[in-house]
Amino acid sequence: LLLARAVANVLLKVKSLSHLFLENNVLTDEDAKVIVKGLNDNYTLETINLSGNKIGDIGVEAFAEMLQHNKCLQIMNLDYNIISPVGIAKLSTVFQRFENSTLTIFVRENDFRLVD
């Protein structure tokens, strides 16, 4: 959580950051929830790369809630995490509410096994 707290702090204080690359840092759902706190009040970040981490459905749910309010973010890369179809469905609600959104979310190579 130390890295996530530092990232959230930077997101809250630095008003000129437009791209953030955090791939392959073993970030978890708990880390994602902390990062979301920084993104909630950040209106400059356009791209965040979180590929190759350990973010699952709980972290994705936090991102989906944040995306209801943050309209600046344009690209979110969640490739190579552990997101199930349930998490993907939560993300899809963002697009259902905002048809004209320019947001692109990448979710390749996640845990797409069917859930019973």
Image: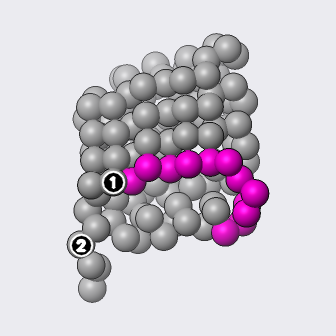
Give the answer, above or below, for where 71 lies relative to 12.
below
Q: Going 33% across and 31% down the picture, which residue do you hit?
A: 23
Give the answer, above or below, for where 87 lies relative to 79.
below
In which image quadrant can residue 16 be found? top right
Which segment did they paint magenta? 96-107
Give the label on residue 11, or none: none
User: Mark 2, mark 1: which one is toward the viewer?
Assistant: 1
Q: Is residue 70 magenta?
A: no
* Extreme residue in the bottom direction: 116
The residue under label 1 is 108
Q: Is residue 102 magenta?
A: yes
User: Which amino acid, by three-letter code, is at mark 1?
Assistant: Arg
| Figure quadrant of the N terminus | top left
| Figure quadrant of the C terminus | bottom left
- Whether residue 90 sits left or right of residue 108 in the image: it is right
User: Which amino acid, by three-letter code, is at mark 2?
Assistant: Arg
Return the residue nearer the eye: 1 or 89: 89
- Whether residue 40 sits left or right of residue 85 in the image: it is right
Q: Going 28% across and 29% down the picture, which residue do you hit?
A: 25
Q: Position of residue 82 (x, y in %)?
A: 28, 55
Viewer can see residue 76: yes
Q: Position of residue 58 (x, y in %)?
A: 42, 57
Q: Position of residue 34 (x, y in %)?
A: 48, 36
> Does the residue at mark 2 contact the one at mark 1 (Cβ under 8 Å)?
no
Q: Position of residue 75 (x, y in %)?
A: 55, 40
Q: Going 43% across and 42% down the picture, which residue do you hit?
A: 77
Mark 2 or mark 1: name the one nearer the start of the chain.
1
The residue under label 2 is 113
Q: Going 60% across and 67% down the picture, which residue do you hit?
A: 93
